[in-house]
Amino acid sequence: MSSTLRRKTLASGAAALAVSLATVCSGTPAQATGSPGTPTPLSGHLPAGRYIVTLRDAPVALYEGGVAGLAATAPEPGGKAEPNSGDTHRYRDYLKDRQNKVAASAGAGIRNRYTTVTNGFTANLTAVQAARLSRQPGVLKVSPDGWNKVTDDSRSTDFLGLSGRHGLWSKLGGTAKSGKGVVVGVIDTGIWPESASFAGPALGTEPPTSKDPYRPFLKGDEIKMKKADGGTFSGHCQTGEEFTEAACNTKLVGARYFGDGWLAATPPEKRNDYVSPRDGGGHGTHTASTAAGDANVPVTVDGHDFGKISGVAPGAVVSAYKALWTGKDEQDSGGYDSDIVAAIDQAVADGVDVINFSAGGLVESQLDAPIQQAFRAAAQAGVFVSTAAGNQGPDARTLDNTAPWTTTVAASTLALPEATVKLGDGRTFVGGSTTVSAVLGPKPLVRAGDVKTPEAGDEAARLCRDGSLDPAKTAGKVVVCDRGVTARVSKSAEVARAGGVGMVLVNTTALDTDADIHTVPTVHLNVPGATTVRDYAATPGATVTLQPGGSSGAPYPQIAPSPPAAPRP
């Protein structure tokens, strides 16, 4: 397994996938419980905007019959839905007709529609239209399009007991058979198909043989695969910006993107992403490789050897559904409910066995929220749904994705590589680091705010934002940068741009620490040591030496504290 690089969230793509691997391979079905609730008329002031309109008729995954001439499409208890059957197509046409009539009753135009796990559509509505639709007898709920953020994640799953002679992989016949015949659908920021974790032979057109019954193949523009449960997966490699059909293979069997909401709300000058399934932020690639990346992939970054990494279910295949997006600023990075529901709907229609969702809202989602209800129907259709509890806390209602029909995994700390900050007065502090491979120093130690450009604001300089540091003042020094707002690795890049030779990244409150791949040698410190180092850097003649090794003595695992998320404006 991989070397641990961060003390961060244990993503649902790790612990929950270990559960799902055993569940799916043993044939134990996922079950859904609960009720979709009753109609909720809107009241009070309603802003014009994008809404999700959910209708009362059951979606394909939950329809048990009752409409004359239309057979039930919900699976039997313990079974799985058949999204491509004739009965399903006929009932889906019925739902679309009903959606058209409801939308027309308020003069609304349908932007996107859902039929598999949710019966509804998205539309841009005026306040009058939203209120009118909420009172229609065939409408269950009219919901403003919500905002979601990706959650942080870990890079070690050794504690799950996967490897070794008595580990889960051995019990399943080895890594090649661990997840064989299973499709993991990852709803996230997309996929970087060139990653070695998704290497596999090119797709051919010949159907699989009895010796390799689960081998994916091309049938027209679809990627077909017989699954271990006897069903069939039908994927698609959607083309777009820097993404061609050749990006998919026998490991990456599907890639789609859903961005109608985000692209409409985020002008091009605020985007830092690809209008395609390609991953603009890296989060989706990481969670997908954690869940089902190939086994024993060697990892070397900037000359640092991190050993070999493996996914939890390395024998499984991946289908990526991009519904979370990367903006130039943190507040523009995330995804709307409507895009995520569309991804869930498509993933179940494609026939995935597992859905991994490492994202959530800024506060606890209600059980009748569109995403949670979509997951409920997915679970009813026989899909194992794995979700992350979120990065917020420890205040009330900051735990997300708590519905009983999903497996929710909380953030916990893990051990990570560490290095030592030795001040000129002899005091030492240990923090997370993968980039201090040799002794650096002693070197002058300065606070970022004291070496800023004349144009930079005090806060921008303390955070080491792009262009905030003056090369004439920074060159040859180790810089103390505050954590927050901008990406951690962008801070060390700014130090390097200004000629700095090292960075001490400091938490301003009690949070976790990380061991990212930085541009210059970096140690990440938590309080109270972080505060001491920052104060010392303000004294005349302050110096520092960065040394490999050391131990903070922090106990693991613990529930990880987390910073507040940036709201969508």
Image (cartoon, helix red, strand yellow):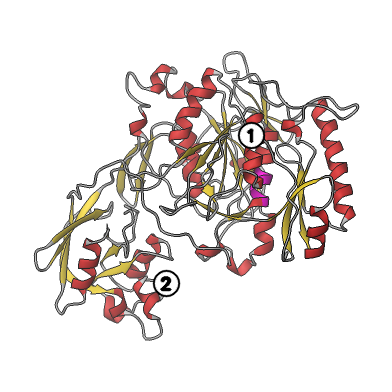
- Outermost residue toward the bottom? 454
Please identify the quarter of the rendering in which residue 35 is found: top right
Q: Which residues are magenta?
A: 338-343
**Residue type, mark 2 in image:** Asp
Number of marks:
2
Please identify the quarter of the rendering in which residue 488 is found: bottom left
Mark nearer the N terminus (1 vs 2): 1
Query: Is any part of residue 314 visible from this angle?
Result: no
Mark 1 closeness class: few <14, some 14–19, many ≥20 residues within 10 Å = few
Which residue, given by chain and number where applicable, does mark 1 sit on?
A: 34
User: Taking 75 as reference, is 235 above or below it?
Assistant: below
Q: Magenta includes 339? A: yes
Where residue 157 appears, as percent x and y from the top left, is 37, 35
Residue at image coords 16%, 58% = 439
Task: Give the main secondary structure of the magenta stretch.
Answer: helix
Label 1, label 2: how far apart the Cα atoms are: 49 Å
The answer to which of 294 and 106 lies nearer the viewer is: 106
Residue at image coords 61%, 23% = 227
Left/right placement of residue 155 relative to residue 100 reads: left
Q: Closer to us: mark 1 or mark 2?
A: 1
Q: Quadrant of the N terminus?
A: top left
**Residue type, mark 1 in image:** Gly
Which residue, given by chain and number where applicable, does mark 2 sit on?
A: 466
Q: Quadrant of the C terminus?
A: bottom right
Left/right placement of residue 454 relative to residue 390 reads: left
Where residue 176 appears, as percent x and y from the top left, is 46, 23
Q: Magenta includes 186? A: no
User: Taking 257 as reference, is 452 above or below it?
Assistant: below
